Image (cartoon, rainbow, N blue to C red):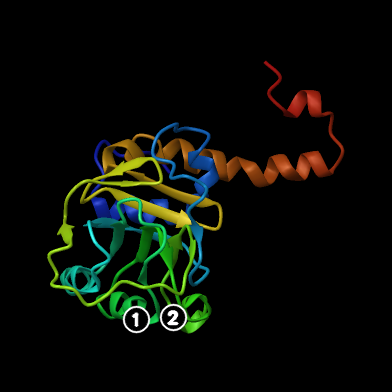
Amino acid sequence: MSAPAELTRAELLERLQRVDLPTLGHHLEQGFVSPAIRRLGQPRRMAGTAATLALDAPDATAVNRALVALRPGEVLVVDMGGDHRHAAIGAVTAAAARARGAAGILVDGVVTDVDALMDMSSGMPVHARATSCLTTKRLDGRGGRHQVPVDIGGVRVAPGDIVLGDANGVIALPPTSLAAVVHQAEVSDAAEPGLIRRIRAGEDLRTLLHLG
């Protein structure tokens, strides 16, 4: 498939849904969230548009307000401001995100209710650093800033960036950065099964692998 001069966001997301995320790692150097953040929720691909929340306090009300504001296809991206003790996401918040049509949740911090999050019926990919029993509290809602640039695992994520995640990790980049490499990634993915078959068939690796 050739790369059109300009892709709509929907077209780009559709194509990225089919690209192996490690293949993007062959063509990009930026946008790769720290591997300390891993998938802790329902095991399926996450792909959507970032809706960001910067939490300055362990404020569950601020999280709830961000959830209510979610639009279909968005990924709720939560910057805990270095707080890796209070879980802002659990079974109820994940269910609320699903009800809003969210594509996933990405937290630079911890989550709770991990058994419920991993249940196939939850339908919500969740990526975070770890789990905790300590949770956010029902404060006044002023402990969070919605739709501002946030820092997630060493990556600056702006509202509207594309967020991709699977068992290998998470990538967050502006649409233009991903559109520039999606065709190359598709070509690489298409070639890989044949290359693996040739390796398994015993062909000389010196003719198959790049050796400089």
Q: Which amino acid is tagged 2?
A: Ser
Image spot of residue 124 (x, y percent): 41, 73
Nearer to us in this view, 97 or 49:
97
- Residue farthest along the right direction in this orientation: 202
User: Can you tell which mark lies on residue 104?
Assistant: none
Q: Residue at x 47, y 69 (%)?
A: 132
Secondary element under disc 1, as helix, strand or loop, is helix
Q: CA distance from mark 1 to mark 2?
A: 7 Å
- Residue farthest along the top direction in this orientation: 212
Secondary element under disc 2, as helix, strand or loop, is helix
Whether residue 35 sits left or right of residue 163 in the image: it is right
Disc 2 target residue: 122
Classify 138 as above or below 207. Answer: below
Image spot of residue 166 (x, y percent): 50, 57
Quarter of the N terminus within the rendering: top left
Disc 1 target residue: 95
Crowd around label 2: few <14 · some 14–19 · many ≥20 (10 Å): some
Image spot of residue 60 (x, y percent): 25, 73
Q: Which amino acid is tagged 1?
A: Ala
Quarter of the C terminus within the rendering: top right
